[in-house]
Image (spheres, rainbow, N blue to C red):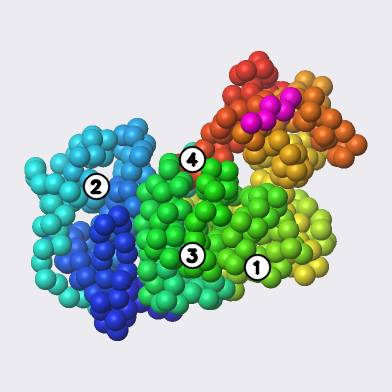
Amino acid sequence: MRSLSSRLQHHALDEPGRRAIAEGERRIDYSSLWAQACAFAQSLESSGVSRGDRVAVILSNCIEAVVACYGCWLAEAVVVPLNAQARPRDLEPWLRHCEARCVVHAHDHADAQAACTAIGPDLIRILVGGHATGHGALSWEQAIAQSATANAPEGNDHALAMILYTSGTTGAPKGVMLSHANLAANVDSIIGYLELNKDDSIVTVLPFYYSYGQSVLHTHLASGAYLVIEQNLVFPHLMVETLAREKVSGFSGVPSTFLLLLNRVPLADYDLSSLRYLTQAGGAMAPAVAQRLHEAIPQARLFIMYGQTEATARLAWLPPERFAEKQGSVGIPIPGVELEVRTEAGTVAAALEVGEVFARGPNVMLGYWRDEAKTREAVDADGWMHTGDLATMDAEGYVNIVGRIKDMVIRGGENIYPREIEEFLYRHPQVQDVQVVGVPDQKYGEELCAWIIAKPGTQPTEDDIRAFCKGQIAHYKVPRYIRFVTSFPMTVTGKIQKFKIRDEMKDLLGLEEQKTA
């Protein structure tokens, strides 16, 4: 299996002037990208970074972040992408946890500076965008100044390549260990079903410290394609202008990304005819939203995808030609991956029976960094990973995610899956977005609570929502608590943090968890 760095080297030698990455007005071709990665690797080695050492990269999406990643691999170091928007209270524990030997960060990133100072003077620092000061510090210009050549290492494919910290939608983040083989397997499967080639191009807004962002980056570079980094998620019309101006063939996002475009940008006013494919992952997209997206950009093939950081991003995909027939499904296993839905008893579930998704394949993580206990809980001796997701599988092997085990609501002995209620409420003509959680209840154990974002210009009431539900869904599935909001708590990657919704409602309503003996 060819490593990602060897594929970058191939493109640099085969078509050296081929465009690789655009970032604003900046451009870099494959030859220059490779040359800078080689120079960066040489600087790491000269600074004392050895094989297996961890190099933390605290940068927003930029060309330097890509160079640093591939340079780490050429030096046989482990790259640890970290959220550049995090504060010292997060950065310092991450740096200590991964035992970082080197940190790459913007020279004016005060929070990164504070975290590095707390770690101590032995930490090697490479500063982007300014002069380096202090012991063990290099400027970016110094780090890539040397003319250096390298060949992609031919070592152990199963060596640790990257540590990704999970985004924290359900609790404390964990360091997911991914090997070079994990990354390559993920890339190969995605290139296959997206049919990517060197003529493709994509705009990405997904951060590189996020597994989905990493996946988009490496699949396109491995294909010899062109990647356009876009930072204007806050101003969605600028993002769409970039899509039209660059005439790219692809765009990737999480559900909230596409909702933002659909609700705030008149897509019909832009020439998006170059778009060949759209990919969606990072959480459930309601069928109604997926249908709107399909209608807004009909020529683009919409790939609904499912995965986890622990699976190097991807586990399943829905072939676009089955979209209408299989609405709500996340599809079939990606090539090389096995999926099973198992009951609580551990047996394989019957067709359409709810159970937990188990996954096995070459993309499943090595484990959690410095946490053998959690690793054993997540991956069994036979290599099967417990995803924590509840789903059904039909007779054709198509998977339909119904929720997280931790999100399932048990009301009076009835198992309720919030996603089912969310998909139903999306049909209400005045509902723009909705999230459903369980909250404590003295009588039934748990009750349903719905947070709803209304469509602009509408003012639905609780009675409207309940009237819509009456006679259409079982009475115990009708939310007892309905709250209208303007936004949901999210990670910076756009994932909904349901535990925060639950906690806020508990505080607001004065609810307490029922205690067991």
x and y, in percent, of residue 437 in the image: 68, 34
Q: Which mark is residue 480?
A: none
Using the numbered discs, state the Cα–Cα distance from disc 3 to disc 2 in whole angstroms: 29 Å
Residue 81 in view in this figure: no
Q: Earlier in the sequence, mark 1 or mark 3?
A: 3
x and y, in percent, of residue 137 in the image: 13, 48
The amino acid type, in three-letter code, at marker 1 is: Pro
Q: Residues within 10 Å of mark 2 (few under 14, many from 20)?
A: many
Residue carrying label 2: 105
The foreground one among 429 and 304 is 429
CB under 8 Å between callouts 4 and 3? no
Q: Residue furthest top?
A: 510
Q: Residue at x 84, y 30 (%)?
A: 467
Q: Is residue 79 above or below residue 407?
A: below
Q: Residue furthest bottom?
A: 14
Using the numbered discs, state the Cα–Cα distance from disc 1 to disc 4 in whole angstroms: 28 Å
Q: Secondary structure at mark 3?
A: strand
Q: Residue at x 81, y 56 (%)?
A: 353
Residue carrying label 4: 491
The amino acid type, in three-letter code, at marker 3 is: Gly
The foreground one among 80 and 484 is 484
Q: What span is colored magenta in the figure?
A: 457-461
The amino acid type, in three-letter code, at marker 4 is: Thr
Using the numbered discs, state the Cα–Cα distance from disc 1 to disc 2 in whole angstroms: 40 Å
Q: Residue at x 71, y 68 (%)?
A: 322
Q: Residues within 10 Å of mark 1 (few under 14, many from 20)?
A: some
Q: Residue at x 65, y 69 (%)?
A: 319
